Image (spheres, rainbow, N blue to C red):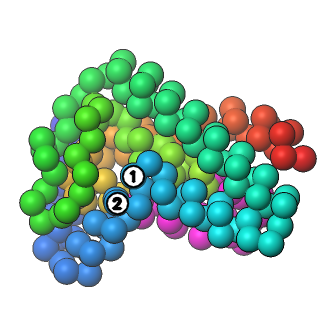
Amino acid sequence: MTSFDSAADRILEPLRNNKASVALFGFASTIGDFSIVWHIVGLIRSIGSSERFQQALALSIALGIESLIVNQGIKRLFRRERPTTSGDERFEVRTPSTSSFPSGHASSATFAAIILTSFTGFPLAILWSIIALVVALSRVVVRIHHLSDIVGGIATGAVLGAIALPIITTVVA
């Protein structure tokens, strides 16, 4: 894992010195905190529709449960150190108090993209996937996570999303 993470870190270093990518990934990391971006997407989608409001509510509740499972359950099993103790000084991001593996941002982003795709269908799945990927990758760029944490987070979010999907679709049907 160390060589994988080190190679990824070297490849991503140019992004940390580019003003546009600093702005993009810093912003993505911040709006990924507490799944803010996904709650906002749910609320925006709900405007003018009681059905979409129920979907937004279900998404927010499910994201809260997903966060508890990842941050208070799975992360406690691994207790992996982060690549830096306070992040990279080129980025103004919150330093989490939980361990590094798996990435909660990557897990919640994947989880939300799966749930939102079930609500909206394929064409918007591309948008949800791009947002999820940018949020997940931002955590490596800002040096709060190792790339392997992101891979683990994506896998975790996919498994939790697959488990939650039939429950959520039954609840909002």
Label 2 sits on what residue type? Answer: Thr
Residue drawn where x is 42% and y is 25% of the image: 72
Indicate left or right for 125 with 150 as reference: right
Query: Magenta residues, as a range?
Result: 114-135
Give percent across and percent down for residue 126: 62, 68
Give the camera-side residue of 154 and 87. Answer: 87
Give percent across and percent down for residue 83: 16, 42
Q: Mark 1: few, some, or many residues within 10 Å (few <14, many ≥20)?
A: some
Q: Are marks 2 and 1 in contact (CB under 8 Å)?
A: yes
Q: Is residue 145 above or below residue 47?
A: above
Q: Quick check: is 56 in the magenta stretch? A: no
The residue labelled by disc 2 is: 30
Residue drawn where x is 18% and y is 64% of the image: 91
**Quarter of the figure with residue 39:** bottom right
Residue drawn where x is 44% and y is 22% of the image: 73
Indicate left or right for 163 with 6 as reference: right
Disc marking residue 33:
1
Label 1 sits on what residue type? Answer: Asp
Give percent across and percent down for residue 20: 26, 81
The furthest residue to the bottom: 20
